[in-house]
Image: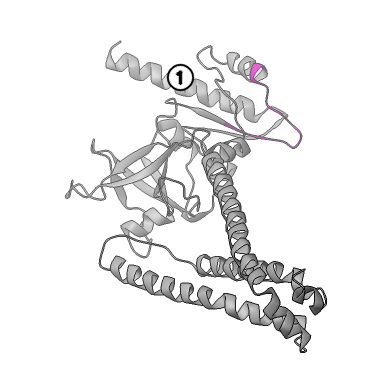
Amino acid sequence: MTTEQRQMASNQRKDELMQITDLFRQHPAVQQASVSNDAPISYAGTFSAMTFLPTMDNPDHILESRIITTDQHFIPLFNIQLLQGRNFSTQEVAARTPVVIINQAFAQQLQPDGQVLGQRLYSHQGLAYEIIGISANHNLPDEWSVEEPFRSFVPRNLINNSTLLLHLKPGMQPDKTALNQMMAQISPHFRAASIYSIEDNVDRVLLSNYLAAAVTSALVVLSFLLAAIGIYGVLSYSVQLRRFELGVRMAIGARPITILGQMLGENFKPVAAGIVLAALLLAALWFGLQQTSFIVELSAGGFALPLLLIVLLTTLTSLLSVWGIIRKPAIYALQGQ
């Protein structure tokens, strides 16, 4: 095929795809329909990207953005808020006009105040995209970007890796056979390869996080139990060696709560020394990292939770180790029972 024939075939497939979307939009089970290269959360956790040049005068200043090629129905379908500007028009989608909607993070990269409506972004082929809208950030960071990435929406190349997006009415379920039969009314070129819901996409993307969290939680619980068993064994043996001493104290009037308080005080001394030593080492490590390019995020909960677990573990093991003695009369301890 010649270049002109390929362009004509591409335009025909695009027109057919638009007709299919319109047909689904009229179906009684469908509330809204759109088409794009992907959903905001893709089933594979992947995304498409495109590089832009803020100005043709500096070809080395390249900005990479996640790209959504879509129509005028995508923005309202997912309730994406437009902070400035407008959505695509029907004519712009039909003519594949080089216009673009970018998110707030991208706009603030171009101008600190985000006032970039009417400015142009350039592709490496020299095509100029006019910025017609600024959308709110999705706030959907992932393993590829810990912060909100740059996002762009353009009404071009809809036939490449197309994803048909259907917002079904409550209680409705998609059926692949029915979808293919409806598409066959327009063109034999389109078939539904797979059907996913947004909930399925979220679960697929977060599956590795769920597994990591489950394994980490299991290891934490196992470590906590092993530490409790080890500390209890050491403290219990120590208490057994001091059984007669504790019995004498109880015999001359020491109450069980007093004995328990003394044991806690003694057991917390090495704990306090360990906490102080760990704090000093952590401070030295922190100051050392300040001299490097490494970035470490710290939180109050990350400090408080381990300290709370250590205190709780020490308290419980101390109580269990001495409980067998203080709950009985002093004569049992003096007799070694």
- Residue toward you, 101 or 307: 307
Q: Is residue 36 visible?
A: yes
Residue 173 found in image quarter: top right
**Few, some or many C-alpha atoms within 10 Å of disc 1 (few <14, some 14-19, many ≥20)?**
some
Residue placed farthest to the right in the image? 329
Q: Is residue 98 above or below residue 4?
A: below
Residue 42 lies in the magenta stretch: no
Helix, strand, or loop for circle 1?
helix
Tell me what residue is drawn at x 57 percent, y 27 percent: 21
Q: Is residue 307 above or below residue 253?
A: above
Q: Is residue 116 above or below residue 331?
A: above
- Residue toward you, 96 or 122: 122
The percent coordinates of residue 129 (x first, y second) are 33, 43
The percent coordinates of residue 62 (x first, y second) are 25, 47
Which range is magenta? 165-177
Tell me what residue is drawn at x 47 percent, y 42 percent: 88
Tell me what residue is drawn at x 48 percent, y 40 percent: 89
Residue 166 lies in the magenta stretch: yes
Q: Pick the quarter of the image with the N terminus.
A: top left
Kind of residue sitting beneath label 1: Arg
Residue placed farthest to the front in the image? 335
- Residue toward you, 91 or 106: 106
Q: Is residue 79 visible?
A: no
The percent coordinates of residue 28 (x first, y second) are 73, 29
Q: Pick the quarter of the image with the C terminus.
A: bottom right
Q: Which residue lies under the disc numbered 1? A: 13
In the rendered structure, the answer to whether residue 170 lies left or right of residue 242 reads: right
